[in-house]
């Protein structure tokens, strides 16, 4: 039984545009003959003309069976022209204003038909054999709900340790560009919760873990992609404390032990004192957060 009620997914096969929406791709032209895709890859973008083309090429050059969906938030910098340039390789692209990155990601999920769904945001790249590595694991491990592929994010992020989720705010083993979830598990667990502006991906992962969905991680040397912080990223407009606030709310929503949450908050503050971590919270914030948790 789910700890939190899932939100209605409302999956759709074809987008019905209105006057404020631009839409294209093979699905809109009835020329997409393959409806049995193994992967659905979704790219979310807003005004990233300098890097979107690299991302597109890293997807369409993969050697696996996939559909590619691009969700544009109404770009005005030439991004849309680049998307149209590659239209014959896209199953669907949509351009309209959205309510943030997770709203855009949810939109892409609703139109996904593949057995497994992956997110690759604009600026991030798959290695040439990236999806082939994931494909190998999914064929070998039948009925997996999710998998974390190794990603290069300044340092190599890999593996999946279920217990780490209880003891660290920095538990996310990879990055969203390395995360793949089965379409069935996505439908059952629900969409990204747009209440969270920074950590809805963490919230989704918590729901999967606490509801005993089955997942694994690839090996350290099997790097499937690269995450790049391009320009002023969305999350860079928020403070580390904003991240912690959301993280605590997510843990409380998923019924994690409050005493353990308080221990993690205290340990984060101690890290600031003894290891002089760049990202940590002040004593005042530590006290405030503990009071919030135990109230």
Image (cartoon, rainbow, N blue to C red):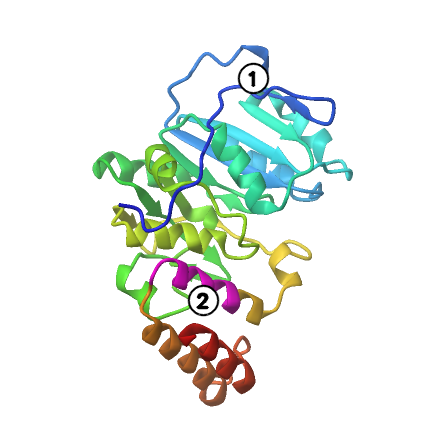
- Residue 259's x, y, as percent? 33, 76
Q: CA distance from mark 2 to mark 1?
A: 42 Å
Helix, strand or loop for the magenta stretch, by majority: helix
- Residue 77's x, y, as percent? 77, 39
Judge left or right: residue 154 versus residue 222. Answer: right
Front residue of 158/236: it is 236
* Residue 160 highlighted magenta (yes or no): no
Front residue of 86/105: it is 105
The quarter holding residue 198 reads bottom right
- Residue 70's x, y, as percent? 58, 32
Q: Report the residue at 21% width, 35% height from top.
A: 142
**Residue at the disc numbered 1:** 26
Q: Earlier in the sequence, mark 2 or mark 1?
A: 1
Front residue of 84/21: it is 21
Judge left or right: residue 188 versus residue 268. Answer: left
Q: Report the residue at 46% width, 79% height from top.
A: 291
* Residue 249 highlighted magenta (yes or no): yes
- Residue 112's x, y, as percent? 46, 28
Q: Report the residue at 42% width, 25% height from top.
A: 113
On the question of residue 128 being in view, the answer is no
Instruction: Tell me the quadrant of the picture where the C terminus can be found.
Output: bottom left
Helix, strand or loop status at disc 2: helix
Label 2 Cα crowd, 10 Å radius (few <14 / some 14-19 / many 20+): many
Helix, strand or loop status at disc 1: helix
Q: Report the residue at 69% width, 31% height from top.
A: 82
Task: Decide: is 67 above or below 272.
Answer: above
**Residue at the disc numbered 2:** 248
> What's drawn in magenta, residue-wise?
244-255
């Amino acid at each position: 039984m789910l700890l939190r009620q899932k939100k209605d997914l409302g999956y759709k096969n074809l987008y019905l545009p209105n006057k404020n929406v631009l839409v294209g791709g093979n699905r809109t032209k009835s020329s997409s003959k393959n409806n049995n895709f193994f992967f659905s890859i979704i790219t979310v973008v807003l005004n990233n003309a300098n890097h979107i083309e690299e991302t597109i090429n890293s997807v369409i050059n993969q050697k696996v069976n996939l559909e590619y969906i691009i969700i544009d938030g109404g770009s005005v910098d030439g991004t849309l022209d680049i998307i149209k340039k590659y239209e014959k390789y896209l199953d669907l692209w949509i351009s309209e204003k959205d309510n943030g990155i997770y709203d855009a990601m949810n939109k892409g999920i609703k139109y996904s038909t593949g057995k497994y769904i992956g997110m690759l945001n604009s600026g991030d790249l798959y290695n040439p054999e990236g999806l082939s590595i994931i494909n190998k694991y999914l064929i070998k491990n039948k009925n997996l709900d999710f998998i974390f592929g190794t990603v290069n994010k300044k340092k190599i992020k890999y593996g999946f340790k279920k217990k780490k989720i209880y003891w660290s705010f920095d538990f996310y083993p990879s990055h969203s560009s390395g995360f793949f979830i089965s379409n069935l598990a996505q439908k059952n667990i629900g969409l990204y919760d747009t209440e969270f502006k920074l950590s809805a991906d963490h919230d989704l992962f918590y729901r999967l873990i606490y509801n005993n969905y089955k997942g694994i991680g690839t090996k350290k040397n099997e790097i499937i992609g690269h995450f790049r912080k391009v320009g002023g990223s969305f999350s860079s407009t928020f403070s580390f404390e904003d991240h912690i606030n959301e993280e605590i709310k997510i843990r409380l929503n998923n019924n994690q032990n409050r005493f353990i949450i308080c221990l993690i908050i205290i340990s984060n503050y101690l890290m600031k004192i003894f290891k002089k971590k760049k990202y940590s919270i002040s004593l005042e914030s530590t006290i405030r957060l503990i009071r919030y948790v135990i109230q």
